[in-house]
Amino acid sequence: MLRSSAIHRALSRCYPLSPSPVGPPAMTRRGLLFTTAVVILAVTAVEHAHSQWRTDGELVEESSWRKSVEGFGVMLRVTDDPEGLFAAWDMPASPDYGPSYSEAETASRGDFVMAFVIFSGCAEDQDGACDCSVDYTAYFPDGEVYGQQGGPLWVGHPDPGPGYLQLSEGNIGLRFESDDPFGSYRITADITDNVSGTRASLATQVTLISVHD
């Protein structure tokens, strides 16, 4: 049975990193199915010259899900509302707007989540276009492969530019089945900038819980 899939959606709009915050969008919380948080995407900047993520000019500690390599900044996140993320990202850019999304840390059997990458600082070729790919892998709690998906991160488009973030073209969607074991499902993203040769590996997790927990 196919457990993973991709939602291919290329959104060329990019957003500045320090907009004024706006109120959270309406969300549906289905009982205890998800632990969610509304996240304003455009709050962290990657300083290209020093290859560091920053918030309000201050260095942010890198982690398994957020790294920068030679000025290429990447973050791996998970949402329980892909369409809401796409709709928020497709809104017109303005100084007082930053896209927000519902972030999933837990899920229940029968639920769908999507992992994706937010990035900045990809190298451009002689035609001014980036060529970045990503390979996602999801793992069962025991370490067995749950599903895999490879594809474009950002191909044929220019870098979003200093001070801007971009949503990846490729992602991986996971539908948890009725017999899937409870526990933490690790998701990794191996990213390659095919112009510069820069590589980055990210990891995050979603915990499958019982609705009675």
Image (cartoon, grey):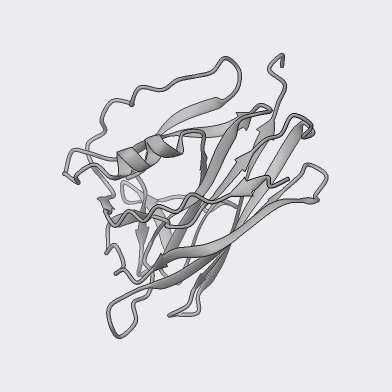
Q: Position of residue 23 (x, y in %)?
A: 28, 25
Is 174 in front, or is 105? Answer: 174
Residue 136 visible, this orientation: no
Q: Is residue 50 above or below residue 28?
A: below
Q: Position of residue 56 (x, y in %)?
A: 31, 46
Residue extending furthest toward the right:
142
Q: In terms of image quadrants, where is residue 50?
A: bottom left
Residue 205 visible, this orientation: yes
> Where does the C terminus fall, quadrant-wise?
top right
Q: Which residue is painted at 26% across and 45% down in the image?
A: 18
Q: Which residue is painted at 24% across and 41% down in the image?
A: 91
Q: Position of residue 143 (x, y in %)?
A: 80, 49
> Where does the N terminus fall, quadrant-wise?
top right
Q: Which residue is painted at 36% across and 42% down in the image?
A: 86
Is 60 in front, or is 166? Answer: 166
Residue extending furthest toward the front:
1
